[in-house]
Amino acid sequence: MIESSAVERTSSAQLAFLILGPLEVRGPAGPVRIPPGRQEAILATLLLEANRVVSTDYLVDLIWDEEPPDTARTQVQICVSRLRKGLAEAGIDAPITTRPPGYLLTAADEMLDLRLFNRRTAEAKVLVKEGRIGEAAELLRSAAALWRGQCLGGVTSDALRAKALQLDEDRLNAVETYIQLELDLGRHHQLVGELGRLLHENPLRERLRGQLMLALHRSGRQSEALDIYRAGRDLLIEELGLIPGEELRLLETAILAGDTALHAGPPAPARPAVEPAVAAPEAADLVQRDELPHQLPTDTADFVGDSALIETVEAVLTGGAGQGAVGVAVMIGKPGIGKSTTATHIAHRLSGEVFSDGQLYCDLRGAQAEPVAPADALGRFLRALGIPGPVIPSSLDERAEMYRTLMATRRVLVVLDDAYDEGQVRPLLPGSDTCAVLVTSRSRMTALPGARRIELKILDETRALELMGLILGPERVDDEREAARALIRTVGGLPLALRIVAARLAARPHWSLASMVNRLANERHRLDELAYGEMTIRTSLSLTFDGLDAGDRHLLRRLSLAQGPTLPGWLAGALMDDHRAQPSDLMEPLVDVQMLDVVSVESTGEFRYRFHEIIKVYAREQLSVTDSRAVRESATERMLGGWLALAERAHRRIYGGDYTVLHGSAPRWVPPADYVEELLSDPLDWLDREQENLCNAVEHAAKEGLDELCWDLAATLVTLFEARGYLDHWETTHRVALDAVRRSGNRRGTAALLASLGTLYLSRGQPEESRESLDQALAIFDELGDRGGLALCRRDLALLERQAGDDDRALALYDRSIHDFGLIGDIVGRATVLTQSAHIWMRRGHTAAAHAQLEEALDIYRSVGFTGGEARALRRVGQVLFQRGEHAEAERTLTDVLAMVRDSGDLIGEGHLLRNLGELKAGQGCYEEARDFFVRSLAVREQIMDHGGAEIVRRDIARLP
């Protein structure tokens, strides 16, 4: 806690450095003059990064936007030396020390207004959590009052202006937050005037507009509140071509309806929206709300559970709002007790009105050898919340921060099924009490703070009879009620065991319930163990397993070889080497006796299946004692060969052929042609949906020593990884495969994976790692005489040379790459090189040569139906046309490409195209239209939380007259 006496605020008179306004430096004797220009820019940068090292290269780039002179580093050193001298002479204790790779300015927090601002906003956040709303609002007001104008006003550096704009945004967030806190305290009368001034200064800030509407409404001035809404709506339409956001529209509706919920009331003890120095609510609002995540598995139609327990769990999940902490319920119990089923049922009950912004679900696979890593789970959740793969941070902490930011103003239920331990769960907890988390686990999770643990019990007789009636029909149970009770006692009321016994009876309607009691009695010793853990479940499973015919038992055993979370229907055909038209028909007998569950239906109408984990363990045991090693290895190779065959065919459909990818000699298992045609009707979507299964297949192949299949599948999956920005999966699968091929001495597989990793490092902006990997691959391909591999390596090495500024070397490598692609007949590879090298000719002013190359590339892309390549080439064509002064045609071309990327859902491409159109309009002198495109591009960048790209666009806007 922060005691009142501890909330000490450094007076601005004590500050030595002020950047929250024009840059000022104050010494004991008064103001210290800092020469404008380079010294001013360097000092501002060192202050923004106070107590952190700033590299010399960064300072050089900061001062010289274009080509820096040869003496650039020396000039930076001179500026730093003069700054040191000036600060020392003024008596300011803030040394600037040389610290590789640059310089470090050391300053105490009380010397810098930015540090003081950050400290006050952080303290305010703590006060809010403690329920001290008035003190928090006062502290935030004092923080915002540190501003003396625009941050770093008068500094001309574009890079510094971008950082300053972000800090100005932080100030507005702090202002909006203390306004909200004071509204919660009922101070609406006092706030009306201040809000009117703030809105006049920031007319496009919807949060401020909503706060003014609320203050006016609570002051009895409803008509004025509605006028403020209408004025804002007209302004947004006129300036941006947009309508107000959902929250503002709902507020207008509530005011019109006289909703009593808008009346001022006592403040909540804590508010999750207080992130004074971070634009958390705005960041969350930027994500499209019309595509809410609904990831829950299907609810169980014949669910039977403890109503009191369900009410307890629901109370935990819905009681968090206003309590300052997210509601966390952990459901624990023995295997087969029904944890996942109960959790899914509760989640569906709450998914509509209570958690209206969606539901996130992840099977954390805690019972398996390799549980899901928290970073991977967060990656899936962020994508479900609208963040494209390339924008998702790589570190766990950064992913968790982005996740909490997006969830801050939402009402979302998060279901974490089969969690391993507390460390796996903690990063997946939202920070907002508007959300809730439902966890199932075999562990008690006693170290999970604030969690309520609920233990599932076996079914009592009443609920067990109800469950049997749902499965067998109530008449059949009523006819033999005493036998039904005896069955319940025999299986100990364990839901899984009871379901299995009832399923067998349902499959044999001529059997009486009494006859099943007699059959169970014949195995009395095993049944005595039924209530004591895994052995009890194994006995119950054996009853159903023994009732299957030989073929179904064989399939059940082989299905346990699969490593993925769900089982597509074609797997049964591969495992049994059965090429029937509908391979999923092989699965249905196992579904009938509940040894497999149907979890979803594909767009093709095919079902997807899943084992209960305990049943899978049982099936594996049966496999190990029944099937020979040769049988297991053959089935595994067909199954993994099926994944490879389908991934390979998906690539061909996307690229129009087997282009720009290397393949090995591993055997494939191909499902029937008509089945494949339907399954891969949308090949990229299929790859995306099967991403987890495909990545598991790479790891499985590595463990089985199938190195040729392993590298081939990993390399083929780059089609998905590159299109969707799954860079983490790209690296993970390739590292696994690389270990496998190196262990086996597979030279070509090693080279193929190194080349692919080189491309990955290029995408990540890691030129040194890329060059090292590509050089190693090139040497091996040269040794093997592999033309396809040489072509791919030289293409990417050429791009590295372009980035390094050696265009002549790049063109030479492109020529050799085109030659190699020609020898192997890879026309898409040729088109890719033509598209890339055209940029060099365009940059050199040879627009005719660039245009000719792009036209040839377009002909190739269109001939094979590769729309992704066509969009990239057309974008370059638009840039060439603009450079040649053909502005109208350039605009038409870029507009067409914009429509293409929007159709494919490529938000990153949309951001680039909107900026290109803005550049075109600015070049024509149409500054208002340019501003419109830049603003729309900025909205897209902010929507996907691409902060670096957003800064670039803000710089474009700042340059406009």
Image (spheres, helix red, strand yellow):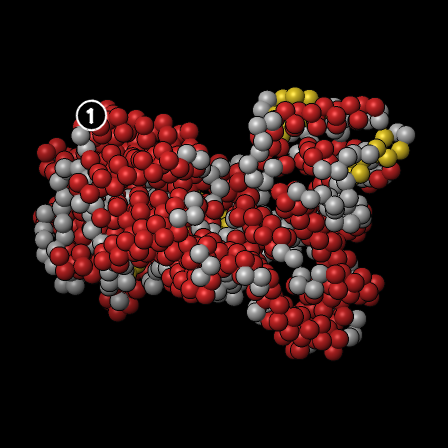
Which percent across, then down, holds residue 832?
Answer: 30, 47
Which element type, helix, strand or loop, lies under badge 1?
helix
Q: Is residue 222 left or right of residue 760?
A: right
Write the residue at 36% across / 50% down: 850
Q: Nearer the viewer, residue 455 or 921?
A: 921
Is the residue marked by circle 1 packed among few (<14), some (14-19), or many (20+) residues within 10 Å? few
Q: Nearer the viewer, residue 502 or 928?
A: 928
Q: Tell me which corner region of the image, top left, top right, bottom left or bottom right, holds residue 366.
A: top left
Q: Is residue 791 left or right of residue 286?
A: left
Write the residue at 78% across / 49% down: 149
Write the residue at 63% across / 24% down: 74
Q: Nearer the viewer, residue 667 or 782?
A: 782
Q: Nearer the viewer, residue 659 or 190?
A: 659
Q: Tell me which corner region of the image, top left, top right, bottom left or bottom right, holds residue 895.
A: bottom left
Residue 458 seen by the camera: no
Say if 430 sits above or below 246 in the image: above
List the residue tagged with mark 1: 783
Quarter in which the C terminus is drawn:
bottom right
Which percent across, then down, holds residue 27?
Answer: 85, 30
Residue 923 seen by the camera: yes
Q: Tell me which corner region of the image, top left, top right, bottom left or bottom right, holds residue 184.
A: bottom right
Say if 684 sits above or below 291 in the image: above
Say if 908 sits above or below 54 in the image: below
Q: Is residue 228 left or right of residue 608?
A: right
Identity, as a three-letter code, of the amino acid under mark 1: Glu
Write the residue at 31% across / 44% down: 833
Q: Is residue 667 left or right of residue 356?
A: left
Which percent across, then down, holds residue 822?
Answer: 20, 43
